[in-house]
Image (cartoon, coloured by chain):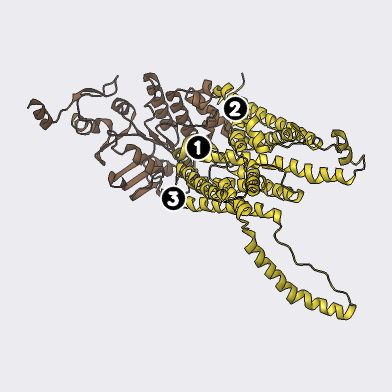
Amino acid sequence: MNNYKNYAQNYSIIDNDELLSVENLHFSWGENKVLNGINFTIPKNELVAVLGINGAGKSTMLKCVNRILKPEKGFIKLLNKDINDLNLVELAKNISYVPQSVLTQFSMDVFDVVLLGRRPHINWRVSENDREIVSNTLKFLKLEDFAFRSFNKLSGGERQRVIIAKAVAQDSKLLLMDEPTSDLDLKNQIVVMKNIKKLIREGKDKSAIIAIHDINIAARFADRILLLHQNELIGEGTPEEVLNEENIATVYGVSCVVEKRTEYESMRIIIKDEIKQKNKRKEEEE
Amino acid sequence: MESISEIHIKKSKFQILLILALSLVTLILAITSMGVGSSENLGFFSTFKIVLGIDQSNDIQSSIIWRIRLPRVIIAIVGGAALATAGALMQGSLGNPLVSPLTLGVASGAALGAALGIIIGFSISEPIGIIIDFLWNLILNIIIYPVNMISMAIFSVALDIPPIPFTGAETVIITNAFIFSLFVVFLIIKLGNYRSVSAESYILVGIAITFICGAIVSTMTYFASDSQLSQLTHWSFGSLARTSLIQSISISIIIILLMPNAMKWAWDLNSLSLGGDDFAISTGVDPIVTRKKILILSAFMTSIIISFTGLIGFLGLAAPHMSRLIVGNDYRKLIPCSAVFGSLLMLFADTLGRTLFAPIVIPVGIMLSIIGGPFFMYLLLQKRRKY
């Protein structure tokens, strides 16, 4: 019996592998359509990158999943439950969200900001366990030295890492991150992404959806890529499958060279130049 | 080396100790404040001898202690605490450091009520009084008179039951101010029912209410007599002299009952004030519902206090900020600290106002702005780096 269970779990017969499923998601700001029928599922233990140009709907999609925005149409299910059936505290136990930036008039110690990640789990009193989780998270993201500095006095990148730490301390199944590396320096971009990857690998059934602009970071760290273009999902799959010259040209309007993954190097995309549209070129010639 | 958790606990304990120390200072000041005043009949030490039962008091002395000084000290403590707490709650829930308890227009509603009472002589409690009088007479006619007739017939004794006077002249302004400010609270509740209402729209509607009420009051003052004008001006100064002992005790009970309710929101306020609406949702806080409930609570607390004291605006703005310099923005400590600091400031300003130019008493609202303003600026400029 036990053997069967192990077998079954390994091959996902008993345990449903699906963490999040989004069906036919529509969203618009007034007349302006932002998401037009998006469908995808996120399995457990995967780091998924969402790519697309500014205004493609990456942030909107993440906000819909976290119920910050209410979609016009469509279903979002977390572990087979409609997210609208969960109250916000239950939702926060399962989904944590890293906004693009947090600007505040009122500041707190970094420790207390990360402690807010424990808010869905605590009633009023902070337990020893919560403090442990917060200090371990700070250590994990190399933020120990900042623990008692004021959040507002940190640089943009440091602040971003603190908010990531808050999401990690929340200990949720699904991490939503809206451009978590946008304010970080080169080294920290890699360190943070490695940490998130480690968290997904070692955490129990955790997944992350990360909206990101840097396609090379996405190619290196993501297990799967969702490519948004003109309010629709035009590509879904591994970085090798999705990030080809054609797709990048369609979405970003740039020409590029894709270097395949080797034994030592992850795949790399070298951006060449913008692709000028033909009629524009004609106008210029005239 | 200490772990991060240990440092955090230590820091928390230190901040709680600071709050306790502040409470002690407030208590000492309250006792001192009981002893000082402009009366020549009552010295500093004789007050305590009378209170402790060592000396016998004459009528004037006991009247000063129990009917003038004690209510004043009580309303200073409770009013300061309530206004400062309301300020802290409003600033946090609206994510704006410029907000004070008067921002939502509660005070201008109260001012409108007071002006109506003083200038036009309109009393909102009159219609209610008429109804109660009617009911009372009904009870008298149906129950008491037959009982009296029977008792007259048998024992030749009648019960002497006077009709109840529901409204006295001195309570007109208070009830008017209170009910009109409640009307503003009601508007805020209505506004909060719109699903998409943002923090900014609360502030803007509050400012609009302030302008509308201000315009109506100005129109009335245009037709007011000199004595009415001076009465209204005195009301708007903000003074602690108008409250009776019974009133101050009743206010205390209401505020003490409301305080735990304020503390209940501490975590939600931490989340809301730090990162705004999106951030709050991600930590399991519904910003719209939470903000609405917090604003109703704080507007209610404000309206209770200012209908008795008149306009005291600066305290609710400054006390939370001063407390942030002491304990930071963690509302679990900020709410109690603001309450204590508010009491302390109000007591200090009122005691100073009573003694500085005795026997002239400077209203507490004026004292708070004159002393508190520069002190507040000094603190902000000095410790700007700290928060």
Residue B195, disc: 3
Task: Tell which circle, 2 or 3, labels the residue nearer the N-terminal end.
Answer: 2
**Mark 2, residue position:** B5
* Tag nearer the camera, 2 or 1: 1
Spot the residue most to the bottom.
Answer: B153
What is the CA distance from the residue labelled 2 to the residue labelled 3?
40 Å
Which chain is the one coloured brown?
A
**Mark 1, residue position:** B95
Name above or below for residue A207 compared with residue A186: below
Task: Tell which circle, 1 or 3, labels the residue nearer the N-terminal end.
Answer: 1
Which amino acid is tagged 3? Answer: Arg
Which amino acid is tagged 2? Answer: Ser
The quarter holding residue A68 reads: top left
Q: Is residue B376 left or right of residue A68?
A: right
Q: Please, which chain is the residue tagged with disc 3 on? A: B
Name above or below for residue B139 compared with residue A278: below
